[in-house]
Image: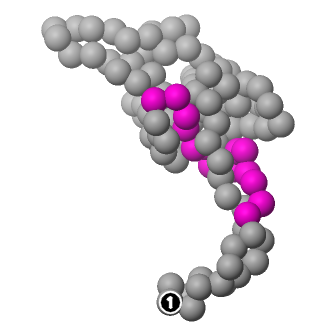
Amino acid sequence: MQKIRKGDEVIVLTGKDKGRRGAVLARVDADYVLVEGVNLAKKHQKPNPYTNTQGGIVDKAMPIHVSNVAIFNPATGKKDKVAIKVENGHKTRVYRSTGEVVGVKG
């Protein structure tokens, strides 16, 4: 079970974007995630008349290693770790500090 999933709000721990917060857009593979507004790179894009895309310099989100992000706990307002809790054969993700279920809006 993945501790950080698509849609989770995370905080960047290291690198040029340290301290920034954003939602996980996608998991690239088991070790990398795309976070909105984090680790942006400039890409020179050619115009393509068939797909009606403009040319120029665009910002592209690049993957960041999952060890460099931590999940954000809205109850405490800080970063937190995630534990996997098994009850009656069902796995759920919970915050380590509070024991609340991850992703449930209260």
Q: Which residue is mark 1?
A: 50
Percent x, y of residue 43? 73, 64
Q: Residue furthest right?
A: 16
Residues drawn in magenta:
30-43
- Identify the element where label 1 is drawn: loop
Residue situated in front as seen by the camera: 69 or 55:
55
- Image check: 29 left or right of 42? left
Display colour scheme: one colour
Crowding near pointer 1: few (<14 within 10 Å), some, many (20+)? few
Q: Position of residue 18 (x, y in %)?
A: 79, 31
Extreme-bottom residue of the structure: 49
The amino acid beneath tag 1 is Tyr
**Residue 53 located left or right of residue 58:** left
Q: Does residue 84 lie above or below 48 as drawn? A: above
Between 88 and 75, which is closer to the camera in this rendering? Answer: 88
User: Residue at position x 40%, y 24% from top?
Assistant: 2
